[in-house]
Each structure stands twice: as C-alpha cells, then as structure tokens.
Amino acid sequence: MRRYALRRVAQIVPVMFFIATINFVLIHLAPGDPAGALAGEGAPKEFIEALRQEYGLDRSLLEQLAVYLGTLLQGDLGFSFAYRRPVIEVILDRVPATLLLVLASQIAAIVFGTLLGAYSARHYPSKLDSVVTGVTLSLYAMPIFWTGLLLILVFAVTLRWLPASGMFSFNAPAEGIGRGLDVARHMVLPASALFLYSLPQYVRLTRASVIEVMREDFITTARAIGYSENVVFLKHALRNALLPAVTVAGLSLSFVFAGALLTETVFGWPGLGRLMYEGVLKRDYPVLMGVFIATSALVLVVGIVTDLIYAALDPRVSYE
Amino acid sequence: MIAAEETLARLDEEHLAAMEGLRRARAVGVRAFAARFLAQPSAVVGALLLGLVAATAALAPFIAPYDPFSLHRTLQPPSAAHWLGTDPLGRDIASMIVWGGRVSLAFAFGAAALSLAVGVLMGAIPGYVGGIVDDLFSRSFDTFLVIPRLFLIILIVALLGSNILFVIAVMGFTMWPSNAKIMRAQVLTIKKRGYVQAAVAAGASPLPIILQHVIPNGLAPVIANSTLQMAYAVLTEAGLSFLGLGDVNQVSWGQILNAGQAYVRSGPWIVISPGLAIMTLLLGLHLVGDGVARVLNPRLSLGRE
C-alpha cells in the first residue's frame, strides 16, 4: 500500500513538468515580448525590466526554461501586478472556497446519483425509469452557467430566498456558527448548480452498470437459491455496480473543476475559478498561469487521494 | 505517400480480392447500422433536433428577422417585432440565436473532426508499432487527460487571441487524447486478426496496412466518442463566450448569455432563449451519440430500448 502510494505521488513529477513547459511555451508564443506576458497588462517598465533580469530573458531558450522551472520549484509563481502581491499568496487565499464548493457538491452528487441510478435500474423497464432517464439527459444538456443563471432567476430574484452572489453578507457575524450559517446560505445556489451538473453522470453510470450486473450469472444463481429480490439487489447487484461510480469520481476531476470555474464566475464565489475570470478581465497573465498550475496540482492530488481511498475499499486492487 | 502507392501496387491479386470482400461487408454493415439506429425512437428524436439546429443555421439569412449586429431599442421584452426581445445593446435576440447556431456547429464539427484525425493517427500508429514508442505515447495521453482542459484553453485564448478558427484548432488539438486511447485499444486487437496478418505476409509495409485495414476497422467506437466531443466543443465555446473570450466578429449563444448575465433582474428573457438553444443542440448530440453507441454495443442500456 505504501509503495503504491509513493508510486502514485511520483507520477506528479512528469505531469507538473509538462504543465510548466506548456506555460513556458505560451509565454514565448504570446505576441510581443515574453517579459510582457510574465508581467501582465498595465505593469510599469521598471517591473518588466526587473522580470527580464530575474528570468534571464536575454539568455538562450534552454537556460530560460531551466530558470523558469527552478523558480516554479521554489514555489514562486510570479508577482501579480494587479493585486500587488505574489501570485502564490493570491491563489492560496482562494483554494479553500473552491475545495469547499467542490467537495460539498461532489459528495452530494455521488450519493444521490448512485442511489437514483440504482433506484431507476431497480424499476427498469418502467415509466419511472423513463422519467429518470429523460430528466438526467436534460440535465446533461444544460450548460452549468445557464443552470446557475436560472437558479439565480428563480431563487434569488423571484422568490428572494437565497443570496445571488458572494460568500459572505456585509453584516454577517465575523466568526462562530453565525458565520458558518451565512456561508452555507451563500453556498446553496452555487453548490446546487455544480451538483446538478455532476449528477447525471453518476445516475447514468450506476443505472447502466446495475442493469448490466442484474443480467449476470451470479444474480440468477442468487435468485435460484431463493434469496429475496431485495437481498439480491442490495447485497449483490448494487455493491458490484458501485465501483465504477468511484472510478469515475476520480477520472472526472478536471471536468468538475471546469464546472467550478464557470459556477464561481456566475455566483461571484471567491475561489480559483473566479480568480481565473478576474485574471482574464484584467489580462493578469501571471495569475492565469498560476491558477492553471495550481488547478492541475489540485486535480492530481485529489485524484491520488481518490485512488488511495478506492484501493483501501476494494481489496482486488493490486498495489504493485 | 509515393512509397505507400508502390507498396499497394505490389500487393497480389488475391489480397485485393479479399479487400473487395471486406469493403462489400462494410457496405452491408452501413445499411444494417442505419436500420438499427432508426429503430430507436430516442435516436430519431436526437437526429431531428440536430436537423432543426442545422437547418436553422444553414438558412440563417432567410430566417433571421434582422441583421444580428443591427441595433434597436435596448432591453425590449419579447414582442411581435422582436420575438425573443432585445439585449442590453439593442440587438435582436431571435436573429442572434439563428446566426449563433453557425458558430456552435462550426465548433462541433471543426473541433471534433480535427480531434478525430489527430487522435486516430496518434492512437493507431504507435499502437501498431508497439514497444517503447507505444509506451511513451500512451503515457503522454494519460498526462494530457489529467490536465484541466478548460483552464488551459482559457489561458491559451487569453494570451494568443480569440479568432474563431484559432480557437477551433486549439480545441481540436486539446481534445484528441481520448480518441487516441480508444483507437489504440482497438488497434491492439485488430493487429492480431487474420486479414492484417495476411497483409503483412503479402509484404505490405506498415503505413498502408494501418491506413487500409487497421484504421477503417477500428473506427466505429472512435466515431461514437465523437458525438461526445462535439457536445464538449459546443459547451466549451459557449463557456468561453460567456466568460467574454468569444470572437468579437461572430455572434454566438454564449455571447448572448454573457451580455445578459448582469440583467437577470431587468431582462430575464435575454438569458432564457440562448440556453434553450444550447440545450437543443446538446440533447440532439447526446441522443444521437447514445443511439450510435447502442447499435455498436447492443448490451448497453443507456436509455429505454
């Protein structure tokens, strides 16, 4: 188990190297001067000149790449002129909000999605199953930012039940339960958007795999032995059908973070995605590149954690 | 290419006859495929939805009530003059929706076709060659697949520009790894089959074998994956335009949503119709995709049979 974990962690290195190289290539492809891309728009001349010295932009490309990778390895993602702070600080401020939103919505989506998928498969074929399939397909076809706008239109603008944007109220208590409740109230709509966006894949997957498993020989055997239909379903079919859902949870992370980016933009949720959007508006390239690196790292780390949980749950996974 | 033609010329007649048989089998396959596809009501609905979007986009100059860039009174609710109202700049939303379909379809077909071409070659050639080359390539697909793609695309577009053709190319070149992975899996089984072994024995060199036998026989699941890729391209374009990274010389559904998001209170009609348009296209793509997948693998139970 420990060797498996170490090997998975070691896989981060080539991927991060690749991502850093993509950034480096983009800096040099950008129109104008690489130092301009490293600085972002609106930076003064002296700042750009300092960057040119720091990153050795008068030297050969290979040397420049080495310097750039070295800087990144020290955790230095550059300096955002728009925020007048190191990029890494700006990013670390935003990570908790994104993780909170992603974890809450994904746990809900996995739990409800597998249950609904299994329930639908249990009643397959029937009218109920067709309704679930139809609703899932429609949700699948809704762009997440549009779902977000509709949620705002209904629950914030028309019904006035929930706040439309942000994470805190101006007059909210600074700490304690009051603050937690205030954040929770702000989180309901964005988390619902992300939940509705992720739900269909779990419903579809669980439904398909439960229907498939119900056709297997061991299910027929269990029925022939005389187990009740509920026992067959819960103990044999559902258990075997749950594994693919966990696998997909790990595989779809970059898709979830993309959804989080758009959701945070719609709801002004102060996470990494919203930071990316602000970076686009301000042409703050160091922040854009920093968020790309940070999100890649998050996807990798959360992916490894998911894999390790999966390995711990399923004894058949080999650690070699 | 010349070398490839010479090799083909060297193939003996027996082999050519075998290929002819294969081609005929494939033609019958297409007819059976169509029949089984059309036997599914949901797939037919999907095809009709796609047809609706395609016809609207193709006939845009005749259907659109106004020039989508022309300005009228701002923030008009739906009326007889403006069926879907006007946006904060005074553009007619119905006309923008009709013309915007072209951008979405250009992304769907352009990006998916590019991704198909690159993915098939990147999967088939290393997969056929095998060894270290194959190892290196499949590792790089896996690396590519974990990268948060939307963040990368936003970064590229923000740094290098949002010209529509450029963005389609960026999408095509970032989407191919899943096609390559599927193609590679296909190649690994196909290269062991009799007709490929026969071509090798007949002295054909690898490239014509890959192009003539391996790729055509492994293509079906990759094409099924393409409907998903088209949906992804449509969604990503809409997302980019929504974030304000669309091509300013085009009208797109995402751009209407971008213009309308600050007016959810005073002009809710602005954001309703473009979302419905995106949904229609995506629903069509998903239903057709499920239909194709079900014909290819009858054991699948994605929806009601």
Image: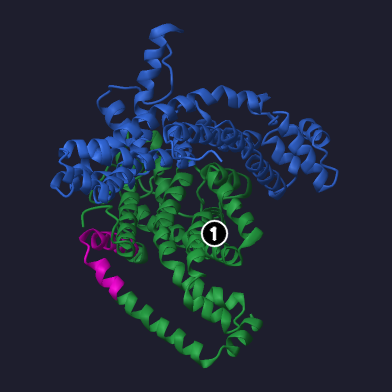
Chain colours: A blue, B green
Residue at 44% over, 40% down: A316
Q: Secondary structure at mark 1?
A: helix
The x, y position of residue B13, in whole percent, is 51, 92
Chain letter for the residue marked with disc 1 in the picture? B
Q: Is residue A40 left or right of residue A94?
A: right
Q: Is residue A123 visible?
A: no
Quadrant for residue B269, please give it.
Answer: top left
* Residue B28 position in % (x across, y down): 32, 79
Which residue does the image show at 24% across and 47% down from the upper left?
Answer: A214
Please indicate whether residue B82 sits to the left or right of residue B199 in the image. Answer: left
Above or below, A234 relative to B102:
above
**Residue name at image x 61 percent, y 66 percent:** B129
Residue B12 or A101: which is nearer the viewer?
A: B12
Q: Residues within 10 Å of mark 1 (few under 14, many from 20)?
A: some
A243 vs A194, nearest the viewer: A243
Task: Tell me the residue at 86%/44% (across/down).
Answer: A59
Residue A75 seen in render: yes
Residue located beneath label 1 in the image: B165
Given the current orientation, which residue lies at the most extreme bottom position? B13
In the picture as drawn, the residue positioned furthest to the front comes out as A225
Above or below residue A183? Residue A130 is below
**Stretch of the chain drawn in magenta:** B32-54
Q: Position of residue B232 (x, y in %)?
A: 43, 51
- Amino acid type, residue under disc 1 in the picture: Leu
Residue A252 sits above or below residue A270 on the image = below
Magenta residues: mostly which secondary structure? helix
From this view, report whether residue B33 is shown above or below residue B288.
below
Where, quadrant-wise, is the C terminus of chain A in this rendering? top right
- In the shown orientation, is residue A66 left or right of residue A229? right
Q: How many marks?
A: 1
Q: Is residue B47 magenta?
A: yes
Where does residue B180 sit, x and y in percent of width and height?
52, 59
